[in-house]
Amino acid sequence: MDHFTYRSGVLHAEDVSLEEIADAVGTPFYVYSTATLERHFKVFEEALKGLPHLICYAMKANSNLAVLRVMVRAGAGMDVVSGGELERALAAGCAPDKIVFSGVGKTEAEMRRALDVGIRQFNVESEPELRALNAVALSAGRVAPVAVRVNPDVDAKTHAKIATGKSENKFGVPIARARAVYAEAAAMEGVAVVGVDVHIGSQLTTLEPYEAAFLKLRELVGVLREDGHEISRLDLGGGLGIPYRRSNEAPPLPFDYGEVVRRTVGDLGCEIEIEPGRLIAGNAGLLVSRVIFRKEGEGRDFLILDAAMNDLIRPAMYDAWHDVEPVREPAADAPVGPVDLVGPVCESGDTFARQREMANVEAGALVAFRSAGAYGAVMSSEYNSRPLIPEVLVSGSRFDVVRPRPTYDEMLGRERIPGWLE
Ligand code: LLP
């Protein structure tokens, strides 16, 4: 459920008309709904009710500081994957002991900073990383709390670019090697084993892969405990999918996911950590864009938008589908026809949708891309020297620009022409 609805024929974010925001900040822009973010967090809370747990929002999905603050206020911890994300979590007010640090390539500087602030847990993805972390911790006079990310070799049945739990993926330690890695960790003075971590992929639309992975994890916990390790936390990663085509997709709900967690690992006496990103932020955000031209092509019409692949890369990168709706609600009998929705960037990949059946809209109209709150703004670039577009946060009847659109001067001002070229 989200809080984007038509009121008096105009699409609103909560109580604010998207036309009003467009007038105030210009197009294109991202808009997020506070109530939707909070609701999605709460749904996970309810799904895990009764189990000791911590929801560590995977901020890679949307790391705007205002969004993070909404999460922190709701009680979330954070899953971070870089030094930059760590600084964002801290800047948003997240308690360090609620921050878990994932990622296959943590640098020594990142490890040191995370140790200095006292994060909750390092999700270690390889033996070399474990050794490096031990060395950094020893030199800093600290002990790093560690969960080893195991790769359970489970097919998440999702897009190849976002599947992470198969043995051919770069993530985690093969589960067959886990015992040896834990034995090595136990002998290190700079690390303390606290748990086991798994994350099998993103945009999962069935629960079976979770079930399979969590059962493997369960077995592993038994073995590790027999080996004398104290396993008190299970980090189950993120990945629960969202409906991108609202007309015909209904992925499992957090409640059903919670039942799988209970059934598979709920009785192990471990604190459960989960790292949802997309499910929290995805349907809490829209990308709003204006039609620059409607162009008649050879056998097809193009809507040329002022948003482009640099603003929302998912269609170009993963062939992802995003529902697109006119901000002015079309009349029930308005003619519908197929159009190609494209941006102004100079490559054919700059296509959001091909032959999409949608109500006719003309130049000047506003359109909204749904499900753009996750992996939208965070993956944007300034390709074609298009400044990053603004982000707006709505709460009830108020809206605030939470990342302004940079001016051309600001964009150019980050670069330098060396003296010898002057
Ligand atoms: N934890 C770890 C270790 C992850 O690698 C990820 C996502 C998550 C949690 C959160 O997964 P989520 O709940 O958001 O599915 N850019 C792609 C998605 C990449 C996901 C990467 N890892 C997209 O636009 O579909």
Image (cartoon, rainbow, N blue to C red):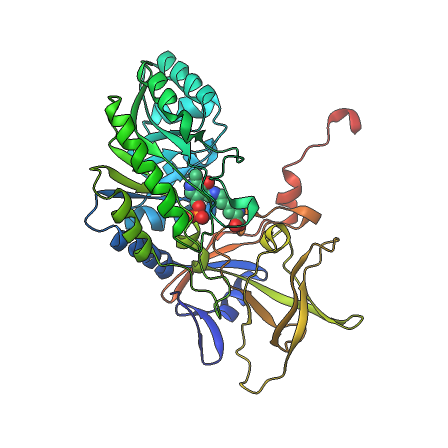
Kindly identify the residue that appears in the image at 49 percent across and 39 percent down: 166
Q: Position of residue 84 (x, y in %)?
A: 47, 34
Residue 40 visible in the current orientation: yes
Foreground: 131 or 209? 209
Kindly identify the residue that appears in the image at 42 percent across and 17 percent down: 131
Kindly identify the residue that appears in the image at 25 percent across and 50 percent down: 48
Q: Position of residue 146 (x, y in %)?
A: 34, 26
Residue 320 vertical position relative to residue 379 in the rendered view, above or below: below
Mark count: 0
Foreground: 225 or 297? 225
Q: Quadrant of the N terminus?
A: bottom left
- Specify whether 37 is left or right of 166: left
- Specify whether 161 is left or right of 172: right
Q: Position of residue 115 (x, y in %)?
A: 36, 23
Q: Position of residue 176 (x, y in %)?
A: 41, 28
Residue 152 vertical position relative to residue 240 in the rendered view, above or below: above
Residue 378 visible in the current orientation: no
Foreground: 196 or 143? 196
Q: Name which quarter of the figure residue 410 lies in.
A: top right
Q: Quadrant of the C terminus?
A: top right
Residue 238 vertical position relative to residue 224 in the rendered view, above or below: below
Q: Name which quarter of the figure residue 137 lies in.
A: top left
